[in-house]
């Protein structure tokens, strides 16, 4: 069985979350306050999903080692 691409997925999600966070800061600086909350929320969701992907990766490796 091949290893699922956990590293690639978590890296891409973290990069997207950071990019959205920077975008939210830029929106605030440019005066687009009505969009900041939505973009910041999406950023937090992406970073949380990246973290949960890492947790899943660790649990998957533990399961493989115990078999």
Image (cartoon, grey):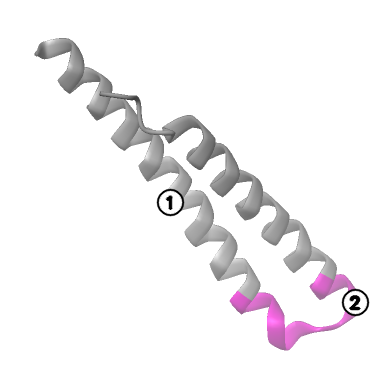
Classify residue 25 by image quadrant: bottom right
Q: Is residue 5 left or right of residue 64?
A: right
Please say if 23 is above or below 28.
Answer: above
Q: Is residue 24 magenta?
A: no
Please say if 16 is above or below 63.
Answer: below
Q: Is residue 62 left or right of residue 6?
A: left
Q: Which residues are magenta?
A: 27-38
Q: Residue at x 81, y 84 (%)?
A: 32
Mark 2 and mark 1: Cα distance apart in space: 28 Å
Please say if 21 is above or below 3.
Answer: below
Q: Is residue 28 magenta?
A: yes
Q: Is residue 3 left or right of residue 59?
A: right
Label 2 neighbour load within 10 Å: few <14, some 14-19, many 20+: few
| Main SS category, magenta section | helix
Please say if 67 is above or below 49.
Answer: above
Task: Say which quadrant the C terminus sits in.
Answer: top left
Q: Position of residue 47 (x, y in %)?
A: 52, 50
Task: Say which quadrant the N terminus sits in.
Answer: top left
Q: Residue at x 53, y 35 (%)?
A: 8
Tell which residue pokes out farthest to the left in this image. Answer: 67
Between 3 and 57, the residue placed more toward the observer is 3
Give the labeled residue for mark 2.
Answer: 30
Classify residue 43 by image quadrant: bottom right
Q: Position of residue 61 (x, y in %)?
A: 26, 20
Q: Label 1, secondary structure: give it.
A: helix
Q: Residue at x 16, y 22 (%)?
A: 63
Between 22 and 64, the residue placed more toward the observer is 64
| Disc ID at residue 49 | 1
Sequence order check: which comes first, mark 2 or mark 1?
A: 2
Q: Position of residue 16 (x, y in %)?
A: 64, 53
């Amino acid at each position: 069985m091949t290893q699922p691409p956990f590293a690639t997925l978590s890296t891409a999600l973290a990069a997207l979350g950071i990019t959205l966070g920077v975008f939210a800061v830029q929106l605030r600086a440019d005066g687009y306050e009505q969009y900041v909350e939505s973009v910041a929320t999406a950023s937090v969701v992406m970073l949380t999903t990246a973290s949960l992907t890492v947790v899943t990766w660790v649990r998957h490796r533990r399961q493989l080692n115990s078999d």
